Amino acid sequence: MVKFTVNGISHTFNGDEDMPLLWYLRDEARLTGTKFGCGIAQCGACTVHIGGMAQRSCSVPMAAVEGENIITIEGLEHSDRLHAVQRAWLEEDVAQCGFCQSGQIMAIASFLKDFPNPSDKDIDENHTNLCRCATYVRMRAAIHKAAAYLQEEI
Ligand code: FES
Ligand code: FES
């Protein structure tokens, strides 16, 4: 048995503990904002926060989430207010098809904890999520805007 929380709600899992967390989130918890892209930890579409840090849920077995607090895109906002990254993403109109975007937002929300005032080089070296629509220019603008919003919130 594996016990953990998702977006602040307690969950218990009794199945195959080798099953990837992504399968649980989408098929059992019905949190379909987290997407399946590659299944091999390469694209980032499945990014969620585990213990506050971004991880690619397609490659995290259920056994590894015992006692963990997991946040998905559905739980990123606080007190009915969108997270700074979500607000910046909307204002910069980042999304194109949108498929990769929840993973992008979760990755950047985590990245900005380590790089609160990132340079373009920091972004280039650390933001490895893929986008087939190539929204990278708009994402870069939104990342800088989100960093500024987060500084205002301190
Ligand atoms: S689906 Fe997990 S990294 Fe691509
Ligand atoms: S917005 Fe289409 S894949 Fe990123």
Image (cartoon, rainbow, N blue to C red):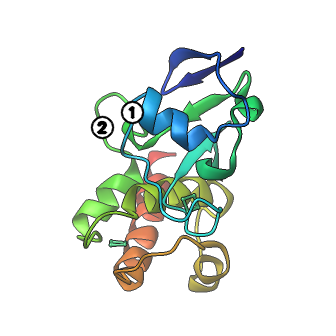
Residue at 69% from the left image edge and 28% from the top image edge: 16
Tag 1 near tag 2, CB within 8 Å: yes
User: Is 24 on the left or on the right of 136, as rendered?
Assistant: right
Q: What's the mark number on residue 120?
A: none
Residue at 50% from the left image edge and 75% from the top image edge: 130
Residue at 60% from the left image edge and 61% from the top image edge: 116
Name the one closer to the observer, 110 or 56: 56
Disc 2 element: loop
From the image, which quarter does the N terminus lie in? top right
Above or below, 52 relative to 11: below
Marks 1 and 2, how far apart at CA: 5 Å
Q: Amino acid at mark 2?
A: Arg
Name the one closer to the observer, 124 or 145: 124
Above or below, 148 relative to 64: below
Q: Amino acid at mark 1?
A: His
* Image quadrant where residue 2 sits: top right
Q: Residues within 10 Å of mark 1 (few under 14, many from 20)?
A: few
Q: What's the mark number on residue 81?
A: 2
Disc 1 element: loop
* Image quadrant where residue 107 sits: bottom right
User: Is 84 on the left or on the right of 51, as rendered?
Assistant: left
Residue at 76% from the left image edge and 30% from the top image edge: 63
Q: Tell me: is circle 2 under 8 Å from ligand 2.
A: no
- Please provide percent x and percent y for residue 138: 34, 79
- Please provide percent x and percent y for residue 122: 65, 78
Residue at the disc numbered 1: 78
- Please provide percent x and percent y for residue 10: 55, 14
* Image quadrant where residue 77 sits: top left
- Please provide percent x and percent y for residue 40: 65, 62
Q: Residues within 10 Å of mark 2 (few under 14, many from 20)?
A: few
Above or below, 116 relative to 51: below
